[in-house]
Image (cartoon, coloured by chain):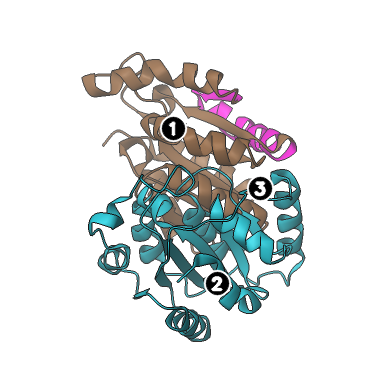
């Protein structure tokens, strides 16, 4: 499976350096190594979800309790979480650090991923969620750190788009 | 059983718990009994009260968390039963007030529990270790107290009449409630685990 192990490790290390102690996740192909890293880490509370929107509630509870969290989801999971993001995280000023695998961009070979690709950034813009793309290894640590800083300072959701060139190794 | 009476019957026990309620009648009736800084009223995001309670319970395992849910709300997030069951926090009590309607919309808008869907049975099938459906105030109070004492993840369904308060107004602004709840929660003895 050409999901990048090295870049998944970079992302995971960056989350740990930010003090993330709770990770909610709904596994998908690009996220398998990240989920496995969370599962193997005795200091990480990994919460595997049935549907991504649950993660908004779990991160809200963790935040009020003083625990830093992050969410791992596919962009279709972001679409599925829109109401929770608006009517919990935004209404109640809850910081969310959302790491979203960005399926359906250039290079996508699965027809079923393509509509979600086209809707992802317009949705983030419509929800006024600041976001950045992680396309190269050099982007990972600084952008995750800065995204978390903004989420915590603004008490609002932020998103990082895990792009194909970062996550999928045989595509260049 | 009236929900307001059921809330009154466990009000004393709630003092030592972190409490997350759903919107509408549950929030208004609990607030009317007397607001406390350990009460959080989730005035929107139907379905996510149980997920929030799970997040608090996992983050602070030394505290007891009580979610006051409703049939309409949990039916919007049934997957939450499976996630709660998977992580099985012993410090989480999930109460579902089941009045078989979307009361804040109107008495005629029944939920599927009115036609036989059984939330306690779904919770048990999801893997929640302790579940019960109760119909009387006495049974509710006793089952709730036992769940508190035994420290086991519980979904307790209380069948209640479809009656609400005259007003759903809660005289604590959502953000005031949120920040006071956070301050109170973080002021409690820090967890040796995650905090």
Q: Are marks 3 and 1 in contact (CB under 8 Å)?
A: no
**Residue at x 61% of width, y 60% of height:** B29
Q: Which residue is mark 3?
A: B169
Image mark 3: chain: B
Q: Which residue is mark 1?
A: A78
Q: Position of residue B183 (x, y in %)?
A: 76, 58
Q: Which chain is brown?
A: A
Classify the position of the N terminus of chain A by image quarter. top left
Along the viewing direction, whichever of A64 and A152 lies nearer the viewer: A64
Q: Describe the element under mark 1 as helix, strand or loop.
A: helix
**Magenta stretch: includes residue A51:** no
Residue stretch in magenta: A130-153
Residue count near mark 1 (Cα–Cα under 10 Å), binned few <14, some 14–19, many ≥20: many
Q: Position of residue B177 (x, y in %)?
A: 72, 52
Mark 3 or 1: in front is: 3
> Is label 2 on the same chain as label 1?
no
Q: Is residue B139 left or right of residue A85?
A: left
Q: Which residue is mark 2?
A: B5
Along the viewing direction, whichever of B12 and A142 lies nearer the viewer: B12
Q: Are marks 2 and 3 in contact (CB under 8 Å)?
A: no
**Residue at x 32% of width, y 39% of height:** A28
Along the viewing direction, whichever of B46 and A26 lies nearer the viewer: B46
Alpha carbons under labels 2 and 3: distance apart = 19 Å
Q: Which chain is cyan?
A: B
Q: Is residue B79 left or right of residue A8?
A: left
Image mark 1: chain: A
Along the viewing direction, whichever of A110 and A83 lies nearer the viewer: A83
Relative to B59, say whether A15 is above or below.
above
């Amino acid at each position: 499976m050409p999901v990048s192990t090295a870049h998944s490790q970079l992302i995971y290390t960056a989350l740990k350096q930010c003090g993330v102690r709770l990770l909610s996740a709904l596994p998908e192909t690009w996220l398998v190594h990240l989920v496995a890293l969370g599962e193997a880490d005795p200091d990480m509370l990994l919460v595997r979800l049935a549907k991504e929107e649950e993660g908004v509630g779990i991160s809200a509870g963790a935040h009020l309790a003083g625990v830093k969290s992050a969410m791992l989801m596919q962009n279709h999971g972001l679409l599925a979480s829109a109401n929770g993001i608006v009517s919990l995280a935004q209404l109640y000023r809850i910081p969310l650090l959302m790491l979203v695998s960005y399926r359906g961009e250039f290079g996508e070979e699965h027809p079923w991923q393509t509509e979600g690709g086209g809707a992802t950034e317009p949705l983030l813009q419509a929800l006024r969620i600041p976001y950045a793309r992680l396309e190269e290894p050099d982007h990972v640590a600084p952008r995750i750190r800065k995204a978390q800083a903004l989420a915590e300072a603004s008490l609002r959701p932020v998103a990082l788009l895990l792009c194909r060139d970062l996550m999928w190794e045989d595509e260049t | 059983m009236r929900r307001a009476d059921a809330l009154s019957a466990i009000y004393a026990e709630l003092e030592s718990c972190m409490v997350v309620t759903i919107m509408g009648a549950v929030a208004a009736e609990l607030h009317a009994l007397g607001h406390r800084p350990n009460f959080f009223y989730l005035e929107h995001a139907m379905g996510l009260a149980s997920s929030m309670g799970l997040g608090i319970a996992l983050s602070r395992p030394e505290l007891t968390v009580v979610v006051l849910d409703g049939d309409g709300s949990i039916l919007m997030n049934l997957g939450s039963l499976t996630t709660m069951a998977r992580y099985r926090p012993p410090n989480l009590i999930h109460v579902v007030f089941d009045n078989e309607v979307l009361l804040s919309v109107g008495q005629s808008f029944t939920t599927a529990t009115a036609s036989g869907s059984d939330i306690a049975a779904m919770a048990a099938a999801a893997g929640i270790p302790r579940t019960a459906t109760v119909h009387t105030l006495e049974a509710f109070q006793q089952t709730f107290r036992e769940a508190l004492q035994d420290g086991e993840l519980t979904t307790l369904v209380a069948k209640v009449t479809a009656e609400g308060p005259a007003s759903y107004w809660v005289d604590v602004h959502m953000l005031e409630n949120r920040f006071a709840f956070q301050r109170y929660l973080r002021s409690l003895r820090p967890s040796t685990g995650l905090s």
